[in-house]
Image (cartoon, rainbow, N blue to C red):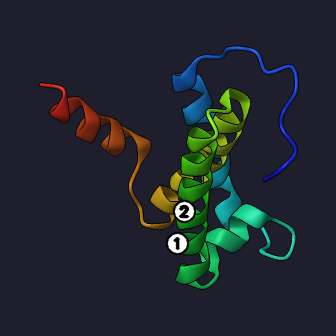
Amino acid sequence: MGVRTVNVQPGNIGETIEGLASTIHARRDASPDESYTARLLTDVEDELLKKIAEEASEVIMACKDNDHDHIRYEAGDLVYHLLVTLERYGVSIDELAGELNARMK
């Protein structure tokens, strides 16, 4: 578990996800030696996939502890790694939105 974020203020999830996805996309051109995101995008596939499993497990454990701040923190890690996964495999956030929208009908 990482250090919990302090002074978290509500935000606009759409703007946040779009901004984060854009930053992740831009990291494709960064050096893997200097950027954790670039490393996840280019290194061995299993390293990223293991992170998804790890972060999902940490969300589950935070929920079992009924720890609101910890759930939020770990969910942030999971969403970040999920967005990196989507970028790595060429699934845009617009495609993801379309998938979710289709399921709500």
**x, y (%) of residue 1?**
78, 53
The residue located at (42%, 42%) in the rendering is 93
Considering every residue shown, the one lying at the far front of the view is 65
Please give left or right for residue 35 compared with residue 45 in the image: right
* Quadrant of the frame with the C terminus: top left
Of 91 and 62, nearer the camera is 62
Residue type highlighted by circle 2: Ile
**x, y (%) of residue 35?**
81, 65
Q: Which residue is mark 1?
A: 49
Please give left or right for residue 81 compared with residue 69 in the image: left
> Whole-Å distance between the Cαs marked 1 and 2?
5 Å
Mark seen at residue 52: 2
Residue type highlighted by circle 1: Leu
Q: Residues within 10 Å of mark 2 (few under 14, many from 20)?
A: many
Please give left or right for residue 64 compared with residue 94 in the image: right
Q: Residues within 10 Å of mark 1 (few under 14, many from 20)?
A: some
Q: Residue 102: name its quadrant.
A: top left
Judging from the image, what secondary structure is the residue with disc 1 in? helix
The residue located at (60%, 85%) in the rendering is 44
**x, y (%) of residue 15?**
58, 24
The residue located at (85%, 76%) in the rendering is 33
Q: Residue 18: name its quadrant.
A: top right
Q: Are marks 1 and 2 in contact (CB under 8 Å)?
A: yes
**x, y (%) of residue 2?**
83, 50
Considering every residue shown, the one lying at the far bottom of the view is 44
Judging from the image, what secondary structure is the residue with disc 2 in? helix
Number of dots carrying numbers: 2
Of 54 and 97, nearer the camera is 54
Mark seen at residue 20: none
Can you say whether 64 is above or below 14 in the image? below
The residue located at (80%, 72%) in the rendering is 31
Of 62 and 93, nearer the camera is 62
